[in-house]
Amino acid sequence: MPKTFKFLKWSGNKAVALFVLTIVLAVAAVGSTVAYIVTKTGEVKNTFTPPDINIDISGDNIANKGDIPVYVRAAVVVNWVNETDGSILSATPVEGTDYEAVYNTDNGWAKGSDGFWYYKTALDPNVAAATLMKTVTQKTQKDGYKLQVQVLSSAIQTTPASAVEQSWGVTVNNDGTLTVN
């Protein structure tokens, strides 16, 4: 016959009292721990200063005026613009037919399959990229319209490398240069 321990047999009011006592002790322990943490720990300040990504474009010269290294890309937009009122003709000039453009591919620029031009090396602060376009020559005339070439640029910080790879679909090589798809 197994032995039973009478002190382990709790029933009725004794069990309820034990349960209530356990709850009261747990609440007291948690409450006093929280009170200690609130009164005894000092204030912690987390100061976050976002980087300054600022590129300056003058013609087709792009310079990093921010405070961190960046990668840059550019889009070349060519339009026929009315000489009188500045309106844009709906017909887009065709490269090779209406104009001839020579790009600076031997000096750091590469054209991606998405139509953007990528500068393959990062620009440190206060450094400019090589000029994107060597020459643009208008080959045809449209009455009352002139050829307008605009270079629009964007920049993204170099770290983490995954940011530029995911955003622009390029690959960052071990030496920090870009491989353009």
Image: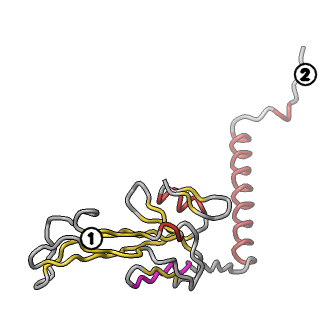
Tell me: residue 87, above or below residue 7: below
Residue 102, how many percent across, how many down? 39, 69
**Which residue is identified by label 1?**
78
Residue 101, how many percent across, how many down? 34, 69
Is-magenta flag for residue 92?
Answer: no
Span shown in magenta: 51-58
Is the residue marked by circle 2 packed among few (<14), some (14-19), or many (20+) residues within 10 Å?
few
If the image is split into quadrants, where does the N terminus sit? Answer: top right
Q: Which amino acid type corresponds to the residue marked 1 in the rendered image?
A: Val
Is-magenta flag for residue 53?
Answer: yes
135 relative position to 169: left or right: left
In front: label 1 or label 2: 1
Q: How is the image coloured?
A: secondary structure
Residue occupying the point 44% across, 74% down: 132
Tag shown at residue 3 = 2
Q: 132 or 22: nearer the eye? A: 132
Label 2's element?
A: loop
Distance from disc 1 to disc 2, alpha carbons, whole Å, reads 97 Å
19 relative position to 147: left or right: right
Residue 74, how many percent across, how many down? 41, 70
Residue 46, how many percent across, how many down? 64, 77
Indicate the quadrant where residue 153 lies: bottom left
Q: Which amino acid type corresponds to the residue marked 2 in the rendered image?
A: Lys
Q: Residue extending furthest front?
A: 139
Label 1's element?
A: strand
Residue occupying the point 40% across, 63% down: 116
Tell me: residue 139, above or below residue 181: below
| Labels 1 & 2 near each other (Cβ < 8 A) | no
Is the residue marked by circle 1 packed among few (<14), some (14-19), or many (20+) residues within 10 Å?
some
Residue occupying the point 44% across, 83% down: 56
Tell me: residue 107, above or below residue 16: below
12 relative position to 179: left or right: right
